[in-house]
Amino acid sequence: MIYYEIMGITKSELFSEKKNRLAAMFKVLAHPARLAILQYIINQKACICNDLVDELGLAQSTISQHLKELKASGIIKGNIEGKSVCYCIDETVWEEFSSSFEDFFKQDILSDKCC
Amino acid sequence: MIYYEIMGITKSELFSEKKNRLAAMFKVLAHPARLAILQYIINQKACICNDLVDELGLAQSTISQHLKELKASGIIKGNIEGKSVCYCIDETVWEEFSSSFEDFFKQDILSDKCC
DNA sequence: ATTTAATATCGTAATATTGCGATGATATAT
DNA sequence: ATATATCATCGCAATATTACGATATTAAAT
């Protein structure tokens, strides 16, 4: 008896809530387009939106999808301004990401027993 | 005339080499199993390997696959010790990851024009 | 009221990822 | 020499991700 319905999905129930959340944060940033979007928003300070399509060379629907994912994570927020939407970094969430990653990497690595 | 062969693949040629590399680093850590593997290696100091199967509750082949991905990124290295393989953190690469993420997050976020 | 501009959503296609069992390779133990 | 233990690889199944065009949706402009 083989259970195939398990395949393909991450078995999140095996891992701590903390690790699942941290992995999800890494995942949001694990695509160059999303990094480029964040970088553009940071550089421009003002939160222009449709410019990203010209800037990155991806289709409008693709950019919109990436923006949705970034927004779902909380790292950016969008304000409706007339017929356009102005996106900007959510500084609180940005700092949360930053310190979560920092906490992970500040652990002492002492691995000399075999390598 | 529609070109479908483009679909599904990340268009890395649109982005800077730096962003592609940074995204790839985030991607390595974007799975709870790989975070758990790293955590276990760090906690145990000594670099045991097959224990991960018991520890995480994933199949041996699945663990092996995650280890391969971690190793390919350079963040861990493996030493053959008899019939087992001892994995440990590569401290240099670990620091590279750490400082790359730190550099990204130390940017000034000044977004008040609209949000 | 109709057009235009900006964005979101839907449907679809293709690749990527995750996971497992089975099998293969290699080194120690018997 | 054979068995056992450890790990890697292969093949497959299922879901996830990435990308696009087409089509809403909404608000401003004419």
Image: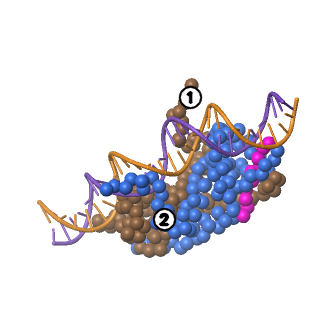
Chain colours: A brown, B blue, C orange, D purple
Alpha carbon separation for disc pair 2 and 1: 42 Å
Chain of the residue where label 2 is placed in the rendered structure: B
Closer-to-camera residue (B89/B15) = B15
Lateral position of residue A108 relative to residue A90, left or right: right
Q: Write down the region rendered in magenta.
A: B83-92
Residue indicated by mark 1: A2
Q: Position of residue C8 (x, y in %)?
A: 35, 56
**Which residue ends up furthest to the top in the rendered image?**
A1
Query: Pointers 2 and 1 in contact (CB under 8 A)?
Result: no
Q: Chain of mark 1?
A: A
Main secondary structure type of the part rendered in magenta: strand
Is residue A72 in view? no
Quarter of the image where the C terminus of chain B is located: bottom left
Q: Is residue A8 left or right of residue B3?
A: right
How would you rate the neighbour count of disc 2 (Cα within 10 Å): few for under 14, some for 14-19, many for 20 or more? few
Q: Which residue is mark 2?
A: B13
Could you say where residue B75 lies in the image, as x and y percent from the top left? 68, 58
- Which residue corresponds to the image point at 59% horizontal and 47% vertical from the top-left? A17
Mark 1 secondary-structure assignment:
loop
Please provide percent x and percent y for residue A11: 57, 41
- Foreground: B10 or B101? B10
Magenta stretch: includes residue A19: no
Instruction: Name which residue type carries label 2.
Output: Glu
To the question of a shared chain for discs 2 and 1, the answer is no
Tell me if mark 1 has few (under 14), some (14-19) or many (20+) residues whose alpha carbon lies within 10 angstroms of its own.
few
Q: Nearer the viewer, residue B35 or B8?
A: B8
